Amino acid sequence: MLDPVFVTGAPNWMDLGTPDVDAATTFYHGLFGWDLVPGGPETGGYGMYRLRGRTVAGVMTVPEDQGKPAWTVYFHTPDADATARTVEKAGGTAAFPPMNVLDYGRMGGFTDNTGAYFGVWQPGTNPGLGMILETGSLIWSELYTPDVPSAAAFFHTVFGWQTGEMDFPGGSYTLVRPADSDDDTSSFGGLVPLDQVPGGAAAGPHWLPYVAVDDTDAAVSAAKRLGGRTTMAATDVPEVGRIATFTDPAGAAFAVIRPVPMPQG
């Protein structure tokens, strides 16, 4: 799972683009208990979701004619401009080039060589998410891609990611972990063939963030009551946990997991 100390290439931020921040806040507060701290004019209205006083995500208004509602996962970089150059050399493209966000940090948005959008965050005064791995916060990220080997090679070039294989019902699962790590316990995400995802062709290549919960079935019930849609029913994955996937009322995709407790000692 994620390392609480952000290293190069590890997820260090996520945010939601949605046409109605108030409606999204009602949904995510009801589901995870997140509270909105609205952004001021200096941030263009970009707000923060917080839980128990710590930041768990960002949120911004994206009008429907400017993009579909979606979650974006960002990865740590010590140099966003150098990463942008590497993305281009590796066959990706820049959706928007790196830019300063006040003194908080420097960010950029890209698509990989298979068409999946992702972001990078070069920390300034804001090092990244204030909470991970705990209930109500980011714990895992998956890339749904039409070409797992090609995507793995791309991100190895860009971030130095290493990969490993884990046995999975019906096949295997490709784990990703930071550069210079040879231990799958440091993995922070996975790569999944797009054709294994219900409705994957329609969704296209994308990253899916997982939020930790104490009760997956309760999360499914709450999401439905709050106007979300379950895209994969609660499912047990041996030695991993109980997972489910959703879209929120505006259509942004995400997942939850009640992880299997880690062995003690």
Image: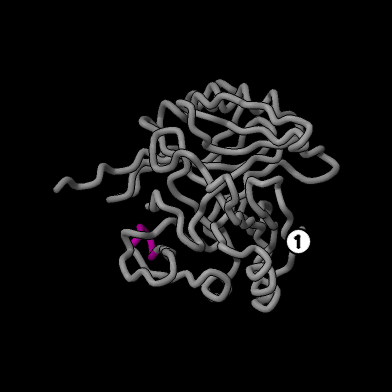
Residue 113 appears in view: no
Q: Residue at x 33, y 63 (%)?
A: 184
Q: Is residue 96 visible?
A: yes
Looking at the picture, how far across and down is residue 212, in whole percent?
42, 38
169 inside magenta stretch: yes
Q: Nearer the viewer, residue 101 or 146?
A: 101
- Residue identified by numbered label 1: 97
- Give the x, y percent position of residue 11: 51, 53
Residue lying farthest to the left in this orientation: 265
Q: Position of residue 81 (x, y in %)?
A: 68, 66
The quadrant in which residue 224 appears is top right
Q: Magenta includes 207?
A: no
Secondary structure beneath dot 1 equals strand
Farthest-out residue, bottom? 89
Q: Which span is picked out in magenta?
A: 167-172
Q: Is the residue 48 above or below the residue 173 in the image?
A: above
Residue at figure coordinates x 39%, y 59% from the top left: 187
Residue sitting nearer the eye, 260 or 104: 104
22 relative position to 214: left or right: right
Quadrant position of residue 64: top right
Tell me the chief SS of the magenta region.
strand
- The residue closer to the viewer here, 78 or 13, is 78
